[in-house]
Image (cartoon, rainbow, N blue to C red):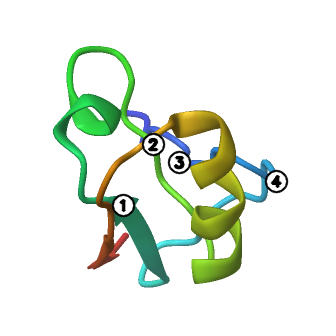
Amino acid sequence: MSERVVKCSMCGKALRPGQTYYKCSVSTCNSGRLRLSFCSPGCWDAHLPTARHRSAGYTEHVN
């Protein structure tokens, strides 16, 4: 069984197992096929200008 490689949605860096990653708190960024993951708060912040969120935050997760 192969594992799915998770990559940062902004910079493309692979997220290693056990690494902390960040997800946008806005539901449209995490629904359907669009599941955005970010390697750092900086990459999450870089996604905001194009996302047009009114009020957003991020949550921490472990890969």
Mark 4: few/some/many CA within 10 Å (<14, 14-19, 20+): few
Q: Is residue 17 left or right of residue 14?
A: left
Q: Secondary structure at mark 3?
A: loop
Which one is earlier in the sequence, the residue at label 3 or at label 4? 3
- Which numbered circle lies on residue 11? 4
Vertically, is 10 above or below 63? Answer: above
Between the C-alphas of marks 4 and 1, the distance is 14 Å
Q: Which comes before the other along the chain, label 2 or label 3?
A: 3
Evaluate if marks 1 and 2 touch, with contact meaning CB atoms under 8 Å apart. yes
Few, some or many residues within 10 Å of mark 3 (<14, 14–19, 20+): some
> Could you say whether the residue bearing mark 1 is in a helix, strand or loop?
strand
- In front of the other: label 1 or label 3? 1
Name which residue type carries label 1: Lys
Query: In the image shown, does 19 or 41 lie closer to the viewer?
Result: 41
Name the element at disc 4. loop
Name the one closer to the observer, 28 or 1. 28
Which quarter shows the C terminus?
bottom left
**Residues at marks 3 and 4 touching, judged by CB atoms closer than 8 Å:** no
